[in-house]
Amino acid sequence: MLSKRTIQIIKSTAPVLAERGTEITTHFYKRMFSNHPELLNIFNHANQEKGRQPTALANTLYAAASHIDELEKLIPAVKQIGHKHRSLGIKKEHYPIVGENLLAAMKEVLGDAITDEVLKAWEEAYGVIAKVFIDVEQEMYDEVDNKEGGWKDFKPFVVVDKVKESDVITSFYLKPKDDDILPEFLPGQYITVRVKVDGEQYLLNRQYSLSDASGKGYFRISVKREAEPNKPNGKVSNFLHDQINVGDELEISSPAGDFTLDVKKDSPVIFISGGVGVTPMMSMLNAVALENPNRSVAFIHAAKNETVHAFQHEVEELMEKLSNGQTFICYEKPQNMGSGDHIGYISKDVLEKFITDEADYYICGPVPFMQAMIESLQELGVRQESIHYEFFGPALTLEQM
Ligand code: HEM
């Protein structure tokens, strides 16, 4: 339990620290990686370079600090992060390393502007916040470990098929090397793929949504080749596209994530995706076609043009299995005029045609795309609790808090 005085210090200093939050966490990461370079086997270097990860950690810590006396309110947000941590193999012994380096970074960045009493209060608060994360994540580890076919950390899978879905997206079908059965997962969940790329000093981890339904005897991920192979962002996707073939092995962690569809629900569902954001939607659409084909479904997808439009035939086939399904395709700049249902972006006018009472809306795609979709749905009067979305990369704001 934190004392009243500690709580008071944390609450009054959180806004001050928040102002310099990214500066502190950027320094913290540099410091931590020079003391513990082995952690570079876990962190996504691309997110570090863009400053996304420091910002995400800073936002979370200051939001947590301002709720330090009512931490139960943070549980939904902690769970979302906990899924990511669990899928990367973050353990309780990692927390003191983060704590120690973070406090030292506060001291080094703020200098005399932070007193020993304030630092001490933050040390205590970090301990309390870390415990919330550790407990949530321990439950998640136990859950995946106890699941039939489940496993705790990474395990080798074999690529049993590799299928080109568009000029930029390729699917990999994966089966466990040990021939064990696969655990059930919820449509919308992702896995972490961990690879050793030639010439790279550290292991590289990336999360990919599962793009097919559970229960089919394989996991499928569908990877977009990022345009710049030599930039951190494109390293793993280009490696997978170019170097990984049928028969090769990949290490993956158990499915994780809470951007999921309740398949059994009978109310209408509208899937809205942009580009490779289609992948979790494919898992959801496959699951509905398999388990609840009478559900009313609209599948709205935006692609730059026909050549990068993935899963066109699979969606058509799935629509035939649904008694009440419709598809709407938008091409930003089609190569053949007249193809697709709409030229340009998914506008508010497009979305308006699909608004129905009681519907749930699932959105996935690049950040500006999602922001535009969420805004349009809100303007069309859709309730916040009916809008579900997942950002790629670290969550930069925690509106849940
Ligand atoms: C991701 C917060 C502790 C490693 C994240 C994210 C947040 C966060 C907000 C982004 C989640 C997302 O992508 O949706 C925190 C907080 C911590 C903490 C508040 C302490 C209380 C740790 C520890 C480690 C760690 C102890 C391991 C040493 C990571 C990694 C990611 C991540 C590897 C994935 C993002 C990337 O690789 O860029 N964390 N974290 N975190 N965290 Fe933590």
Image (cartoon, helix red, strand yellow):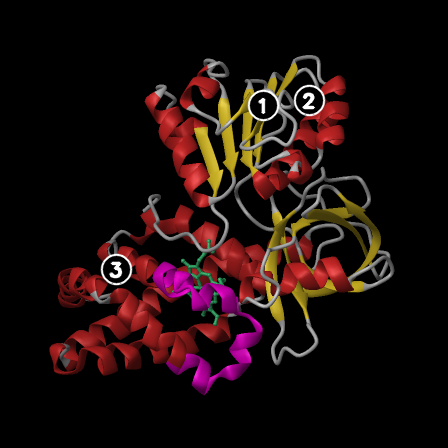
Q: Which image quadrant shows ligand 1? A: bottom left
Please say if the residues under marks 1 and 2 sit with CB atoms less than 8 Å apart.
yes
Could you say where residue 70 lies in the image, as x and y percent from the top left?
27, 51
In magenta stretch: residue 45: yes
The magenta stretch is 31-57
In magenta stretch: residue 141: no
- Mark drawn on residue 65: 3
Predominant SS along the magenta part: helix
How much space separates mark 1 and mark 2, taking CA atoms? 8 Å
Residue type beneath disc 3: Ala
Residue pictured at 63% horizontal, 38% vertical: 187
Residue pictured at 42% horizontal, 53% vertical: 78
Q: N-terminal of the two: label 1 or label 2?
A: 1
Q: Is residue 376 visible?
A: yes
Is 182 left, or right, of 341 in this rendering?
Answer: right
Circle 1 sits on which residue?
265
- Mark drawn on residue 229: none
- Element carrying mark 2: loop
Circle 2 sits on which residue?
292
Could you say where residue 97 lies in the image, as x and y percent from the top left?
42, 78
- Element carrying mark 1: loop
Residue type beneath disc 1: Lys
